[in-house]
Amino acid sequence: MVIFLLISGGLLSLVAGAEALVRGASRLVAALGISPLVIGLTVVAFGTSSPELAISLQSTFIGQPDIAVGNVVGSNIFNMLVIVGLSAVITPLVVHQQLVRLDMPLLITISLITWWMAANGVVSRWEGAILFAGLMVYIAFLVWQSRRESAEVQEEYEAEYGDGRLQDWRLWLLNLGSVGIGLALLVVGSNWLVEGAAQLARIFGLSELIIGLTIVAAGTSLPEVATSVLAAIRGERDIAVGNAVGSSIFNLMAVLALTAVFAPSGINVATAALNFDIPVMTAVAVASLPIFFTGNLIARWEGMVFLGYYIAYTAYLVLDATGHRALPQYSAIMLQFVLPLTILTLLIFLVRDWRARYLLKS
């Protein structure tokens, strides 16, 4: 009962804290005359990743790096397979060219770089600093590019975050209080969730890495789930998919990077994560690119495939953690039948899409 209260209370505190932080910080920054679009690309992106950052920092400081690594890696897998998949099931998702040409290739590149950095079993402080410096360059590019966006996009962000003019000093205090409350809830929520997850791992004999990859990763991704699902329901389909991709980039270049920078000796990476989970995270990003590319639309059936693969991934983690005798047969089915069939289907759709584009041009 205590564990349930810790985990559920931690998750609720993280979600509420992220919401309060995003709202307060967005209006404070907007009051300084910053474009609402730039706020959406920076403050909001950081805000929705703040639960992951709070959890990763807290778990690293108390000597539980497996939860920190599992949180980031698991969140990225969850973002691409569950958030995009669920949003596509609700409504087919529009994929902008920037996502195909810039953001997805960047996510793939950063995933590969993270894999390479972790190859020696640790992401050092200077490697974290390099990742975070890369994020600053990425944000600078987004700010420059945002000035070229259409008035329609600007109005969309203004409708969500306001025009940024705080004329009353009481509004300044209100938003400062919102930021303070958000940060406090994040700290409290991260403490509760990490403690509850650690106790759960001990009771069921599961590793902290498995708990981080599943319960903690899914829990800290709740702000992204809410944002993307609501965007899909409202018909804002580009926001639904862009939020998941942007959050995954921030998880690696901000959450993992800052955790490595502030950790006394970097983040230790478990062999299991290095041999399986980080490759899966990278493979998911690589496999998503052709799906995003085909017709610039993620269909409902593709969303169902995404969800199916997350269920299959979670099932593998459970079977492996419990040492179940069905694991060899399950692995063989996935490797020899399901994965080849999926690759073949993607190739067919890529060829069909290429032919349609070629015929249209000619």
Image: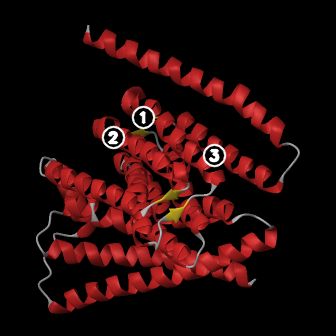
In terms of depth relative to the viewer, which is nearer, 305 or 92? Answer: 305
Mark 2–mark 3 Cα distance, whole angstroms, equals: 26 Å
Q: Distance between the residues labelled 1 and 2?
A: 8 Å
Amino acid type assigned to the residue bearing label 2 in the image? Leu
**Residue occupying the point 40% across, 30% down:** 293
Looking at this rendering, what residue extends furthest in the right direction?
A: 325
At 27% across and 76% down in the image, what residue appears? 25
Q: Please, what secondary structure does the residue beneath circle 2 have? A: helix
Could you tell me which quadrant the N terminus lies in? bottom right
Q: Is residue 18 above or below residue 142?
A: below
User: Which quadrant would the C terminus be assigned to in this image?
Assistant: top left
First in residue order: circle 1 vs circle 2 = 2
The picture places residue 123, in percent across and down from the top left corner, at: 47, 58
Residue 152 makes an appearance in the image:
yes
Asked if residue 184 lies left or right of residue 312, the reply is left
- Residue located beneath label 3 in the image: 276
Rendered location of residue 115, percent (x, y)? 49, 47
Q: Earlier in the sequence, mark 1 or mark 3?
A: 3
Farthest-out residue, top:
362
Q: In the visual, does 277 lie left or right of 21?
A: right
- Badge 2: few (under 14), some or many (20 or more) residues near its Cα, within 10 Å? many
Q: In this view, does 318 lie to the left or right of 82?
A: right
Q: Do the residues labelled 1 and 2 touch (CB within 8 Å)?
A: yes
Q: Mark 1 points at which residue?
A: 292
